[in-house]
Amino acid sequence: MVIRNKLGMPEINPEDHPLGYDLLLPSGIKVDVKCRGGALPFKEEYESSDGIAREAKHNFFARQMHDERLDTDMYVMTHLETPSKRELPGTTRQRKWILYICGWVSKERVANEGVYLPRGSLTEQGRTWFTYRGQEIEYYNRNLNGLETVEDLLSIDPPDVEKDRNHKGDLNLTSVDAVRIAYDLIGRGVLSEKHLAFVQKETGLAKIVKPILHANQYFHLLNWLKGKGALTDSEIEKARQVLQEEPYSGI
């Protein structure tokens, strides 16, 4: 409704408007407006306890890519910052309703490049972790096409969308997860140290990445191996160069 208003369109589509898109641009391009949100503003990067930022991502329900009734050419990705009490229409004293326009992307690029994650998959956002309750496709903010103003949408035409369909974007992973995956695949004998070095160079990430499990769990295994005579003190000290135990320090 906000975007339609900014484009000089009626805020609400007529009742017989198709389900799959929200806007029909003058060029005939169908646009579906997607919205995420919460009490915090949009951030391109989220801080983490290890000092390495996690890049922002957007999510699509996987069925959006596969349900033929949801017919659209492109998506406009937005983020709605809200007051803690989010009941619409809000009060006249509330000043925290802010809509961030993050960018646009063709449906084909999301289908081709986004990472599908089934229910129960784990994802990280800054200092927090959570599992997906639905079938999701992750697509990273850095891969969107930017907009300087909302009105720029009116200048998008079929050649722009076709060009985007064929464009090859960057990773749809955080830099941290790319390094984690490289670590894991080295241990499984799939990749080698040269592949890790390549990932680190491409992502610009030379810092030590913390594991998904807590370091205390790693040291529990290391000490168990030592107790079984399968590990030496020097090997445990080597682990302390990249992992840090965290003793209980009180509530």
Image (spheres, rainbow, N blue to C red):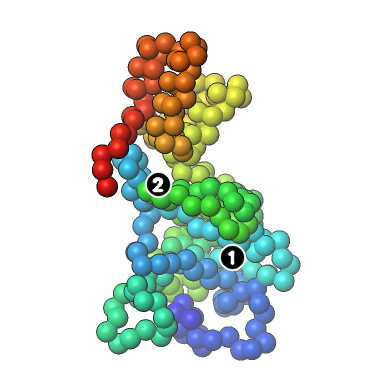
The label on residue 54 is 2
Q: Nearer the viewer, residue 215 or 170?
A: 215
Disc 2 versus disc 1: nearer the observer: 2
**Callout 1 environment at 10 Å: few (<14), some (14 to 19), or many (20+)?**
many
The label on residue 63 is none
The structure residue drawn at horizontal position 62% and vertical position 54%, both measured from the top left corner, is: 119
Mark 2 vs mark 1, CA separation in Å:
26 Å
Q: Is residue 24 left or right of residue 92?
A: right
Could you tell me which secondary element the residue under label 1 belongs to? strand
Q: Is residue 35 left or right of residue 206?
A: right
The structure residue drawn at horizontal position 48% and vertical position 81%, both measured from the top left corner, is: 1
Q: Position of residue 200 (x, y in %)?
A: 43, 31
The structure residue drawn at horizontal position 45% and vertical position 70%, both measured from the top left corner, is: 152
Q: Position of residue 85 (x, y in %)?
A: 36, 76
Q: Is residue 180 above or below residue 3?
A: above
Q: Is residue 214 above or below residue 237?
A: below
Q: Position of residue 157 (x, y in %)?
A: 57, 68
Amino acid type at mark 1: Met
Q: Quadrant of residue 214?
A: top left
Exactly how many numbered labels are in the figure?
2
Q: Can residue 162 be seen at all in this image of the molecule? A: no
Residue that label 1 marks? 74
Could you tell me which secondary element the residue under label 2 belongs to? strand
Amino acid type at mark 2: Arg
Q: Is residue 9 left or right of residue 90?
A: right
